Amino acid sequence: MNDLLADSPEPDAPAAKKEMDLEAGPSSVPEAGQDMTTFFQEVNDVKSSMAEIRKRFQKLQDTNEESKVVTRAANMKALKEKMENDLDDISKIAQGLKGKLEALDKANIANRKIKGCHEGSSTDRTRMAITSTLKKKLKELMVDFQALRQKFQDEYREVVERRVFTVTGQKVDESVIERLIDTGDSEQIFQKAIQEQGRGQILDTIAEIQERHDAVRDIEKKLLELHQIFLDMAVLVEAQGELLDNIETQVFPLITSPHLNFFDLQRPSKTLSLLFSYLFNERT
């Protein structure tokens, strides 16, 4: 994908070219004499934070894949601690990212007081379009983490079902699996197997299921805490009156009609409930 700060296409460029260069913002260049160096440094700082979150997101995915083949409680505990540490790091970075986006919004508004940088000027349109693109990337991060959370839950159920079948040789009722997922207590389910095979042979499986239950519970808690940070940033987006997924409709008219202003901060805001429903619908 083109760099956020790359040159934008000419106004009459094909639609595909416009789509590819969307992250560059409007094709208009800032008025001569307006130094955008500080703004671009702040943008790069935000991008770096997002890249760090994305890198740790990949680590979470890798660790989750590793956890699916673990059969010993001690190994599961080690992976749980690894994932918790990564989530703690992500939450710290996300908190900092929230502050950076708030500062960027304030700087954009303050910049309009500078001569030649009034609302609707090419400098203002450039700043607002690039900031909006950053927030679109943030929205993508939010959706990815929500999907990962759901993936953890689904795969936990699959692993538990496999463990029960391996030990008992039978498929148990959904209600039994639900109870096991809720409590992590598998000893009662394995009573017959314990009597037939001996407690020692089943003990490792019981301990591993309990450890896996604790891991999912604790990781879920941390993911919810991270989700709340993202929600706070979604409020920041709503307060500015931007619908992130419609960035194309904000930028392209500016390319063809520079007199149109699609960044009027005085326009009525959409309800928070609509925004949250749009951003955070659970995936099925």
Image (cartoon, grey):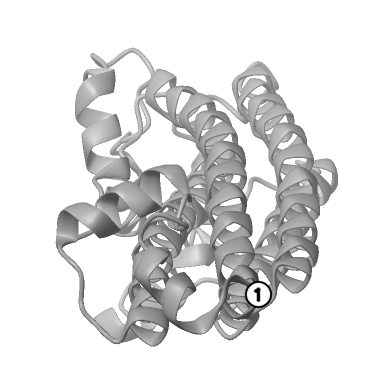
Left or right of 161: which side holds 284?
Answer: left
**Secondary structure of the residue carrying numbered label 1:** helix
Q: Is residue 66 visible?
A: yes
- Residue 160: image location, x then y, percent: 40, 69
Q: Residue at x 76, y 73 (%)?
A: 75
Height in image: 5 above or below 247?
below
- Quadrant holding the C terminus: bottom left
Mark count: 1
Q: Residue at x 47, y 50 (%)?
A: 185
How crowded pointer 1 is (Cα within 10 Å; few <14, some 14-19, many 20+) is rated as few
**Quadrant assignment, res 188:** bottom left
- Quadrant holding the N terminus: bottom right
Question: In the depicted view, which residue is nearer to us: 77 or 268?
Answer: 77
Q: Residue at x 69, y 76 (%)?
A: 72
Q: Residue at x 28, y 38 (%)?
A: 260
**Quadrant assignment, res 269:** top left
Q: Is residue 14 visible?
A: no
Question: In the depicted view, which residue is nearer to us: 260 or 166?
Answer: 166
Name which residue type carries label 1: Gly
- Residue 8: image location, x then y, percent: 51, 71
Left or right of 168: which side holds 45?
Answer: right
Height in image: 273 above or below 57?
above
Left or right of 40: which side holds 131?
Answer: left
Question: In the depicted view, which residue is nearer to us: 16 or 220?
Answer: 220
- Residue 274: image location, x then y, percent: 19, 28
Residue position marked by numbered label 1 in the rendering: 200
- Residue 37: image location, x then y, percent: 84, 48
Question: In the depicted view, which residue is nearer to us: 44 or 5?
Answer: 44
